[in-house]
Image: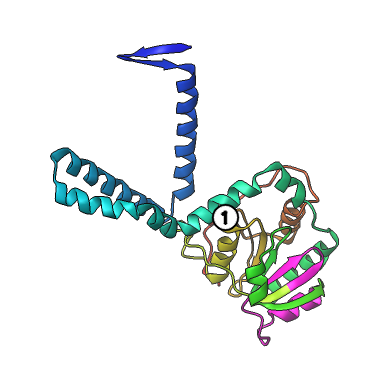
Amino acid sequence: MNLIPIGFMEFGFRDLIETLIIAGVLFYLYRWIRGTFAVPVFIGIIVIFTINALVSIFGLTTIEFAMRRILDVGVLAVIIIFQPEIRKLLYNLGRNTSFDRFMNRTEPNEITDEVIEAVKEMARKKIGALIVFARNTPLNDLVDQGVRLDAKVTHELLVTIFSRDTELHDGAVVIRGNTIESAGCFLPISQNRQISSTFGTRHRAALGITEINNVFVIVVSEETGRISVAHNGKLTSGLTIQKLRNEMEYHLGKNTEEEGEETAFKPAEKES
């Protein structure tokens, strides 16, 4: 069915659907690469294709031959350059499925009080902490590089792990179910340029792991004792204990109410 005649072309219903799909994909790609180093790289790729088109038009055969050799390896180069972004995209697609949402609500509630008690004590004493709730995400690369514990979650053990006189205090703790699976794990640092300079390494690591994995992370600043949480590449900072409990209950599967306010990269004093 033709809708709109455009010169010698006829714009039909199928063309409209295709246009909307392409527009949606381009919009999603823009949101995907916005604020990352992928933007200038993407512009560079467009420039190369534009130069190649101009060279073909003017018949500059030698330059055209060289440009084609460059473009022959272009696909492989794009995959290598955009590897972190592609990984993030695939994780986002996977964790947005209905099956994934169904599987996510498995965290037991009995650990909430233990974690809350530990965070409260560490915030009061300004003990830096980084706690990752793995849920159904394997995280084998992180767990294997850390120290395997497979210990029950207790607030005493968490405070001990992150105390400054222990060898594991600089890394992250990975919790799965009601078990501390591993400690002393080092997380990937976020490369997002929109992150405020007031946030330190722990907060950037919390954002980094949530950008590529479906996990929930609690951060305690060693400098200020400020409590923050990270999920889906967003950071909410300056939480009270009650707000932390609400965030845990929502993200870990007990509370079905609407998600509260999220403040991405909220300005704060310098934190580690």
Q: Nearer the viewer, residue 138 or 130?
A: 138
Callout 1 secondary element: loop
Please, which colouring scheme is shown? rainbow
Figure quadrant of the C terminus: bottom right
Q: Position of residue 253 (x, y in %)?
A: 78, 51
Q: In the displayed structure, does residue 9 sit left or right of residue 202?
A: left
Q: In the displayed structure, does residue 150 sit left or right of residue 219?
A: right
Q: Is residue 137 above or below residue 151?
A: above
Q: Is residue 194 magenta?
A: no
Q: Position of residue 232 (x, y in %)?
A: 61, 53
**Snapshot quadrant of residue 217:** bottom right
Q: Residue furthest bottom?
A: 165
Q: In the displayed structure, does residue 107 sit left or right of residue 92?
A: right
Residue extent of the magenta highlight: 155-181
Q: Position of residue 69 (x, y in %)?
A: 27, 54
Q: Residue furthest right?
A: 110
Q: Is residue 189 above or below residue 232?
A: below
Q: Is residue 94 above or below residue 21?
A: below
Residue at mark 1: 233
**Snapshot quadrant of residue 229:** bottom right
Amino acid of disc 1: Gly
The residue positioned 81% from the left and 51% from the top of the image is 254
User: Residue 127, can we see it?
Assistant: no
